[in-house]
Amino acid sequence: MFSRRNRRPSSPELSKAWECLDADDVPGALRELRRNEGAPLGQVALVVGRAARAAGFDDLGEAAAALAAHPGRPQALYDYGYACVERGVSHLAIPALREAARLAPDSPAVLRELVSAYEDENRHRDAADLLLAHEEGFADWPDRYLLVHNAVLAGDLALARRQHALLPDPVDGVWADARDRQDRVLERAASAGRVSPLDHADLRGWQYVMGGTVLGGLSPYGYDAGMAGRYAWIQDTHDQCLSGLLRLRSVLAAAGLRPRSVSLLPDRGSRILGLAAAEVLDLPAEPHTAGRPDTVVIAYDLDTVADTARGPEVLEQLLRRAPGQVLHEHASCWTRPPAVAADSVALLHQSAVAPWGAGLRQGADGGVEPGAPDDRPEERIAREIVGADPTPDEGDGQTPADPVERLTDFVSAVRGTWLRGDRDRVRSSGPVASSRFV
C-alpha cells in the first residue's frame, strides 16, 4: 500500500503537478491538473490521491487510490467523481464521471452526479446537453427540472420554456419550493425580455432573471477584455458608494416604492453605508430587526455581515422576505456569491477593498504600500459619502453607456415580478461569462 500511494505518475503532462506536491503546493498541483483535463485518469488519480492525503481528505484519497488501481471500473470512477464533488474540486470529477457515464449509460446516479459537477463549474450548456441526450429515460423530478434549470443558466430560454411546459406538478412535496422558484425565474425572464436582450452580454438582465437582483451599475473597465461589466478587483471609494445609493434611490422611485426607514445591519461597513443611505433617501435609520416591513436594508457586503457574531442569524432572517422590504448590497462577490441574493446590488466584483478598509496607497518613495484602515467614527465617514462626487468614472472608454434612465426603464418593466419569493442564493454566474483571477 505504501508503494502504491507514493508511485509517481508516468504521464509527462502531470510531472509539474507532482513537482508542486514535492514542494507542498497543493493548490498549485490542482491548477496544473485543471490545465490537463485529458490526462489518463489512473495517472491523475495518483496525483489527486497524494494531494488529498496532504489536505487530510481521507475519503478522496481512498477513492483516488481505488481509481488508480482500477481505472476502468464504473464504480471506482463514480466513487472518485462523487468524492471530488463533495470536496469542492468538481473539475477533477468531470472526466471520471464522463467515463463512468459512457460505461454505465443507464445509471441515474452517474448522470446526476455529472450534472452536479458541470453545474459547479458553470458548464450549464454541457449539463443541459447531457440531460437532453438522456431525456427518454430520465425522471421529470429531478431530471427535467434540472434540464430547465441548466437551460436557463446557459442562456437558452427557448429550451427552458419547452421543457418547463412538459414538467408536471411534483407528486413529492419536497419539490414544491423548487417548482415555485423555477416559475418565478421564467416569469422574471418574460418581464425582463420586454426591455433587455437577454443575450450573452446582458449582465443586468440575467442577474435579474437568475435571482431577482437589480444590478445598479457596470464596471467601466475591461468590458471587452473579458469582464463584461463585472469588476475583478476594486479599491472602492466614497464617490462609488454615493453613486450606488443615488441609483438605488432611482430604482425605488421607478418601482413605485415608498419605504419608511433604513435598516442598519450589525457590521461596521453596513452601518456606515446605511447612515449615508438614510441621508440620501431622507429616511430615519434604525437597527435591523427581523420582519420589519417597508424598509431598505443596507449591506455594504453580505459576506462581511456573515462574519459578525449575529451574522448567520441575520442572514437567515433576510432570506425570508418581509412585505415592502428591499435588501440592497453595495459590493457583491460574483465568484463566491453570498448566502442571500440581494434585491439590489450596486456592483459585482471578485475582490473589493472598502473605502474604510486597509487599501493600497502611494508611499513616500513613489511605490505602492498597504494603508491603514479608517477607524474614524461611522457617522463622520457616512457624512463624507453623502458629500462625495457621484460623477461616473469614465473608465477605459470601452464599456457601453449605462445612463440611469436605462436602469430605471428596466426597473419599470420588471416591477411586477420584482421582490417576490425568498432571496435564494444564486451559485452560478449565469450566461454572461467573465474572466476570473485566482
Image: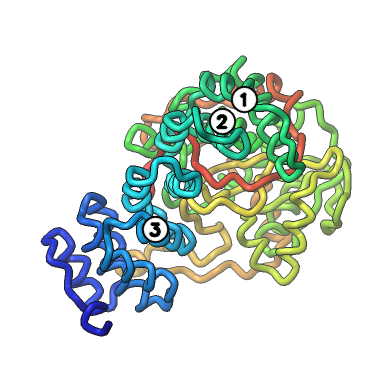
Name the residue tied to disc 3: 75
Which label number is shown at residue 310? none
Name the residue furthest top.
Answer: 194
Q: Which quadrant of the structure image shows residue 382?
A: bottom right
Q: Report the amino acid beneath label 1.
A: His
For image coordinates 68% across by 53% down, the residue present is 299
Identify the image quadrant of the N terminus. bottom left
The relative height of residue 333 versus residue 170 in the rendered view (above or below) is below
For image coordinates 62% across by 62% down, the residue present is 304
Q: Secondary structure at mark 2?
A: helix
Horizontal relation, residue 435 to residue 416: left or right: left
Name the residue furthest bottom.
Answer: 2
Q: Report the amino acid beneath label 2.
A: Val
Q: Secondary structure at mark 1?
A: helix
Name the residue tied to disc 1: 164
Q: Report the amino acid beneath label 3.
A: Gln
Name the residue tied to disc 2: 148
Q: Secondary structure at mark 3?
A: helix
The relative height of residue 371 versus residue 2 in the rendered view (above or below) is above
Q: How many marks?
A: 3
